[in-house]
Amino acid sequence: MNYFERIRALREDNDYTQREIAALLNVGQRTYADYEYGETRIPVSSLIILAKFYDVDMNYICGVSNAKKAFPKS
């Protein structure tokens, strides 16, 4: 699974709208939609924000692992 499929699945599983997640990332809804459709690459800094927000490991959100581990706390 690609990162753009993962961010969409996470958003839908948690009942958020694209507009809500776009606001979290300080981007427009259309830009966020482009992230989810794989039309625009999402910045790593935004992936980190999403991993923290959904409390999942970066390996999961990036599609490297299927294990939903919690985001490491510092």
Image (cartoon, rainbow, N blue to C red):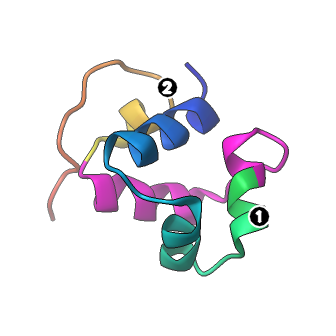
Indicate the amino acid at tag 2.
Answer: Gly
The structure residue drawn at horizontal position 30% and vertical position 53%, both measured from the top left corner, is 54
Q: Residues within 10 Å of mark 1 (few under 14, many from 20)?
A: some
Residue tagged by mark 2? 63
Q: Is residue 60 left or right of residue 64?
A: left
Left or right of 41 in this view: 62: left
State left or right for residue 7 relative to residue 31.
Answer: left
Secondary structure, mark 2, is loop
Name the secondary structure under disc 1.
helix
Label total for image: 2
Cα–Cα gap, marks 2 and 1: 21 Å
Magenta segment: does it hold 45? yes
View extreme (right): residue: 39
- The amino acid type, in three-letter code, at marker 1 is Thr
* Residue placed under numbered mark 1 in the picture: 31
Name the front one of labels 2 and 1: 1
Residues at discs 2 and 1 in contact (Cβ within 8 Å): no
Q: Percent from the top left, x then y, of residue 19?
A: 58, 69
* 45, 34: nearer the viewer: 34
The answer to which image quadrant residue 61 occupies is top left
Q: Position of residue 26 (x, y in %)?
A: 60, 81
Q: How many other residues sit within 10 Å of disc 2, few (<14), some (14-19) or many (≥20)?
A: some
**57 lies left or right of 3:** left
Q: Residue at x 54, y 78 (%)?
A: 23
Quadrant location of the N terminus? top right
Q: Which residues are magenta?
A: 34-55
- At 59% from the left and 57% from the top, the residue drawn is 44
